[in-house]
Amino acid sequence: MDKMKETYEAMLGLVAELVLDEAVLKFQTEKLNHAIDTALASGDEDTFYRLVKQLNELKH
């Protein structure tokens, strides 16, 4: 029974890590998208391209 409990707890830990990773990725993506929109609105081409590059790297 203890082995089953250990396995269950390990699986819960992995699921929690996946959920946290997904939340961080979503937050970072939204933050970059907002910054990209701001750069577009202000006509800041250099910042726009830098942020788009960061966003693409984040997705891979």
Image: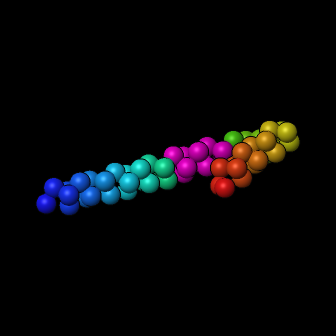
Decide if residue 41 is in sight here. Answer: no
Toward which corner of the image does residue 2 lie, by quadrant? bottom left
Instruction: Based on the picture, tell me whether residue 30 belongs to the magenta stretch.
Output: yes
- Residue lying farthest left? 1
| 42, above or below 11, in the image | above
Q: Check the picture and name the quadrant holding the C terminus.
A: bottom right
Q: Check the picture and name the quadrant holding the N terminus.
A: bottom left
Give how far across and how far down residue 44 sits, in percent. Answer: 83, 38
Point 20% across, 61% down: residue: 4
Toward which corner of the image does residue 28 lie, by quadrant? top right
Would residue 27 be found to the left or right of residue 51 on screen? left
Would residue 15 be found to the left or right of residue 57 on screen? left
| 5, above or below 33, in the image | below
Give how far across and how far down residue 6 sits, in percent. Answer: 23, 54
Q: Nearer the viewer, residue 24 or 43?
A: 24
Please report the bounds of the magenta region as a residue range: 24-34
| 47, above or below 57, in the image | above
Total labels drawn: 0
Instruction: Based on the picture, tell me whether residue 48 belongs to the magenta stretch.
Output: no
In the rendered view, how is the structure colored? rainbow
Point 32% across, 57% down: residue: 11
Q: Nearer the viewer, residue 18 or 27?
A: 18
Would residue 46 be found to the left or right of residue 4 on screen? right
